[in-house]
Image (spheres, helix red, strand yellow):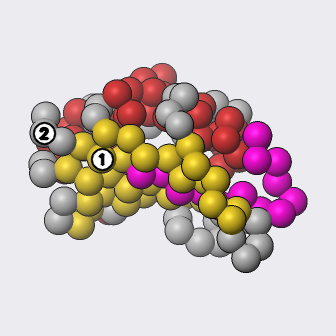
Amino acid sequence: MDEIEVRVEVEINPTESEEKVRRAVENVFGGIPVQIKPLRKGSLLVMEAKGLEALTKLYNLLRRERIRDAARGALFEGLSEKIITFYLNKQVAFVGHVSFSKAVAESPLGPIKVQIKCDNPRQLIDWLAPKTA
């Protein structure tokens, strides 16, 4: 598969522990280095990585949780040319599971935003979340 860039962004609200938000991201994406950027309220955790390795943990979680079909739907829904954008529930990620969410209002603490850039996103979706039926 060609060049893949993964970018994960998640707001850390003033009421949240940076450590817990970091753990939520690591539970889904592994120990990829993160940057913390200050926002007007709270801060933003940003993780950027290249290559399929950045998605290996998510790949394994989708199989363990048996949610490939739901994942596939969410990934295709977020597909726009060469970018796939999707959102994950932060609290669910903290306990080591995967739950897709919407960009706003589903979780009071806000979602984890994931963007994957690649030349062949359909091929990537087929790898990450192949059809089960």
The residue tagged with tag 1: helix, strand or loop? strand
Circles 2, 1 touching at the beta carbon (< 8 Å): no
Q: Is residue 65 visible in this depiction of the protein?
A: no
Q: Position of residue 126 (x, y in %)?
A: 20, 38
Looking at the image, is 103 positioned above or below residue 18? below
Q: Residue at x 54, y 53 (%)?
A: 46
Instruction: Name the amino acid type tagged 2.
Output: Asp
Q: Position of residue 49 (x, y in %)?
A: 38, 41
Judged left or right of residue 95, residue 112 is left
Q: Position of residue 98 (x, y in %)?
A: 55, 39
The residue tagged with tag 2: helix, strand or loop? loop
Gap between marks 2 and 1 measured at Cα:
10 Å
Image quarter in which the N terminus is found? top left
Task: Check disc 2 and report the residue beneath it.
Answer: 2
Q: Is residue 79 visible in this depiction of the protein?
A: yes
Q: Position of residue 83 (x, y in %)?
A: 26, 60
Q: Which residues are magenta?
A: 7-20
Q: Magenta includes 69? A: no
Q: Which quadrant holds residue 44?
A: bottom right
Q: Residue at x 76, y 47 (%)?
A: 18
Q: Residue at x 12, y 49 (%)?
A: 120
Numbered disc total: 2
Judged left or right of residue 64, residue 20 is right
- Number of the label disc, if any, that sits on residue 5: 1
Judged left or right of residue 76, residue 6 is right
Q: Residues within 10 Å of mark 2 (few under 14, many from 20)?
A: few
Please tell me which residue lies in front, 47 or 82. Answer: 47
Q: Which quadrant holds residue 78?
A: bottom left
Looking at the image, is 126 positioned above or below residue 53? below
Instruction: Name the amino acid type tagged 1.
Output: Glu
Residue at the extreme bottom: 40
Q: Residue at x 38, y 34 (%)?
A: 55
